[in-house]
Amino acid sequence: MIEKIKKLVHDKEKMMHYIRYLVVGVLTTVVSWGSFWILRHLVPALEENIANMISIALAIIFAYFTNRNYVFRSTETNKWKEFFKFLLSRLSSFLFEAGGFWLLNTFTPVDEMINKIICSFFVIIINYVISKFFVFKNA
C-alpha cells in the first residue's frame, strides 16, 4: 500500500488529475449544498425533496463542464453525445442521492443538511468511477 502511494506521489500528472477532481468535486458539492440551502431558506414553501432534486440537477450541469474541461480534459468532438452520456451516468447517482436522502429524511431523526452531506460523500466516489470508465474513458 505504501509503495502505491509513493508511486502515485511521484507520478505528477496522475496526482494533478486527482487534485483537479478533488477541487471540482468540492466546487460541485458547494453548488449542490449551496443551492439546496438557498432554495430551502429563500423558498421555504418548496418541499425539501424538490429542493434537493433541483440542487442535484444544478450540480450535474456544473459538474459536466468542469469535469470535461479541467479534470478529464476531454477532446471528444461530439459534445452533445458526451453530455448525454454524462447525464445518463449521473442519473444513477441522482437516483442514489435522491433515494438515500428520502430514506434518511423519512426514517431517521437526523437533520436534512446532515443527510445531504452523508449522501454526497458516496455520490462523489460513484461519480468519479462512472466518469472515468464510462463518460470520459478516452480522455
Image (cartoon, helix red, strand yellow):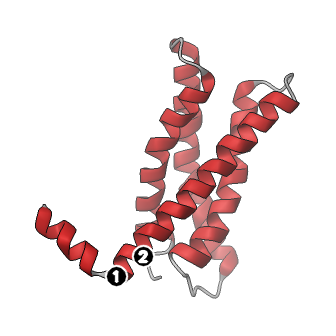
Q: Residue 105 lies in what quarter of the image?
A: top right
Name above or below for residue 42 compared with residue 111.
below
Q: Residue 12 bears which disc, if any?
A: 1
Residue drawn at x 48%, y 61% is: 22
The image position of residue 122, as x and y in percent, is 44, 43
Q: Amino acid at mark 2?
A: Met
The image position of residue 111, as x and y in percent, is 59, 19
Badge 1 crowding class, 10 Å Cα cut-off, few under 14, some 14 to 19, many 20 or more, is few
Name above or below for residue 95 compared with residue 69.
above
State the SS at label 1: helix
Badge 2 crowding class, 10 Å Cα cut-off, few under 14, some 14 to 19, many 20 or more, is few
Tell me: 19 left or right of 111: left
Q: Residue 90 lies in what quarter of the image?
A: bottom right
Tell me: 85 left or right of 34: left
State the SS at label 2: helix
Q: Residue 5 lies in what quarter of the image?
A: bottom left
Q: Mark 2 — residue?
A: 16
The image position of residue 76, as x and y in percent, is 58, 85
Name above or below for residue 119 compared with residue 77.
above
* Residue 103 seen in the figure: yes
Residue drawn at x 59%, y 35% is: 98
Residue drawn at x 41%, y 68% is: 18
- Dots 2, 1 in contact, CB < 8 A: yes
Name above or below for residue 121 compared with residue 25.
above
Q: Residue 4 bears which disc, if any?
A: none
* Residue 56 seen in the figure: no
